[in-house]
Amino acid sequence: MSVKHPIISVTGSSGAGTTSVRQTFEIIFRREHITAAYIEGDAFHRYDRTEMEWASAEAKKKGNNHFSHFGLEANLLEELDEVFHDYGELGTGRTRHYIHDEAEAERLGAPVGTFTPWEDFPRNTDLLFYEGLHGAVKTGKLNLAQHGDLKIGVVPVINLEWIQKLQRDKSMRGYSHEAAIDAILTRMPDYVKYICPQFTETDINFQRIPTVDTSNPFIARWIPTPDESMVVIRFKDPRGIDFPYLLSMIPTSFMSRANSIVIPGSKLDLAMQLILTPLILTLGERKRRAS
């Protein structure tokens, strides 16, 4: 954690909705005139697409059928830990971009499935924003969670997360139905071991719950809409959270526990604006006082 150079981490598995959360943060940053340095978790994968296919094949030869980006070996987490440390101390660091599709390839000038060269963060940024798989991971050797000044978890219930991943992999990545299911099964042990424990470390979790039947996510034809969902928002430390204000501003919301509020799925963006804006401004005020 750092007063002068705060770090915000948004953590969730691929398909969970972390990109949508990032867009909300970007709106707040623009409105409040905050300059952020950004890290996409994919930038710290160890392998490009071709190398990952080779590494997965080699792992299977050795009896490891669960080699995935969710695990430690497929990522540069020590390097990410170093970047978090350096930014917290000095406001410096570096990142790169992973090219997901043709649009990004054209914009960034690199082939799909590869990385752009490493580049330094812009100078004089107000904070660092991370969005990816491992923003709050803790292992025997690494503790990335210790660096975050505000840690957000994005955690749909598992059936909904699977539906979102299946739909995305088939429509955007061209996977067959069987290949998309195999990807889910391959990464499940690392999901349990490395992804789930992070949501104990996060300061706030946003968990979307469908209000329609998702009993068999593997035959679902559509992703439940926000109007067909509720969102449980859990605060690790509810002190200082103005729950009466949130309840008055978000129609039909209610408290489910002393540290949790439940809202309609269609009001998620409003809730995030109401909750996150004062927290981000507090980080900025701490930074100004320290400077």
Image (spheres, helix red, strand yellow):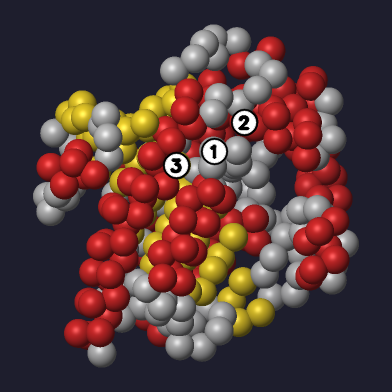
Q: In which image quadrant can residue 38 be found?
A: bottom right
Q: CA distance from mark 1 to mark 2?
A: 7 Å
Q: Which residue is depicted at the point 84% across and 45% down?
A: 54
Q: CA distance from mark 3 to mark 2?
A: 13 Å
Q: CA distance from mark 1 to mark 3?
A: 6 Å
Q: Amino acid at mark 3?
A: Val
Q: Is residue 165 left or right of residue 87?
A: right
Q: Residues within 10 Å of mark 1 (few under 14, many from 20)?
A: many
Place of residue 104 in the rendered image (x, y in percent of width and height, measured from the top left): 78, 61
Residue 30 against residue 251 in the figure, above or below = below
Q: Is residue 13 left or right of residue 90?
A: right
Name the foreground residue: 141 vs 165.
165
Q: Is residue 55 left or right of residue 11?
A: right
Residue named by callout 1: 16
Of the 4 image quadrants, the one containing the N terminus is bottom left
Q: Which residue is depicted at the point 85% across and 56% down?
A: 102
Q: Is residue 31 visible?
A: yes
Residue named by callout 2: 164
Name the foreground residue: 77 vs 164.
164
Q: Amino acid at mark 1?
A: Ala
Name the foreground residue: 272 vs 12.
272
Q: Is residue 183 visible?
A: no
Residue 16 against residue 189 in the figure, above or below = below
The answer to whether marks 1 and 3 mark residues whose Cβ atoms lie closer than 8 Å is: yes
Q: Which numbered marker is on residue 154?
A: 3
Place of residue 18 in the rendered image (x, y in percent of width and height, measured from the top left): 52, 47
Q: Residues within 10 Å of mark 3 (few under 14, many from 20)?
A: many
Q: Which numbered marker is on residue 65?
A: none
The answer to whether marks 1 and 2 mark residues whose Cβ atoms lie closer than 8 Å is: yes
- Asked which secondary structure carries label 1, the reply is loop
Q: Amino acid at mark 2?
A: Gln
